[in-house]
Amino acid sequence: VCKDFIAALDQCHSQWWGARFMGTCNKAKQELNMCLRKERLDRAARNREVSRERRKKTEAGWQGLEEDD
């Protein structure tokens, strides 16, 4: 998903040897960081939802075992 941002940053860095050090690529770097951050937050939200569902199944299983006693 962030491939375009990665390519843009690589292109910026390859244009001039001092681009990394002079801050000319800061905008591309910031855009890449924001894209990666969004991906990470989305992945964490998905993982949290899967975890909640798994926990519900586990709790239901334990509830069923307790009722059998």
Image (tube, rainbow, N blue to C red):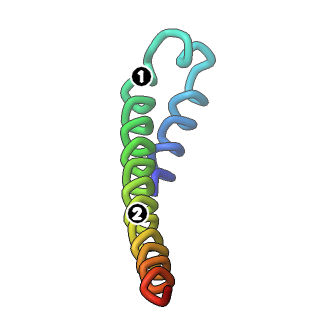
Q: Which mark is residue 60?
A: none
Say which residue appears at 52% left-offset and 43% top-offset: 6
Q: Which residue is mark 2?
A: 46
Rendered view: 56 above or below 68: above
Instruction: Give the residue type at disc 1.
Output: Asn
Could you classify mark 2 by the number of other residues whose Cα lies within 10 Å: few (under 14), some (14-19), or many (20 or more)? few
**Towards the viewer: 64 or 22:** 64
Q: Residue furthest top?
A: 22
SS category of the residue bearing label 1: helix
**x, y (%) of residue 62?**
48, 77
Q: Mark 2 or mark 1, which is nearer to you?
A: 2
Using the rendered view, name the quadrant where residue 64 is placed.
Answer: bottom left
Instruction: Give the residue type at disc 2.
Output: Arg
SS category of the residue bearing label 2: helix
**Towards the viewer: 62 or 7:** 62
Q: Which residue is mark 1?
A: 26
**x, y (%) of residue 24?**
43, 18
Determine whether, in the image, residue 3 is placed left or right of residue 41. Answer: right
Cα separation, mark 2 vs mark 1, equals 30 Å
Sooner in the amino-acid sequence: mark 2 or mark 1: 1
Rendered view: 32 above or below 46: above
Say which residue appears at 39% left-offset and 30% top-offset: 30
Say which residue appears at 45% left-offset and 30% top-offset: 29
**x, y (%) of residue 52?**
39, 66
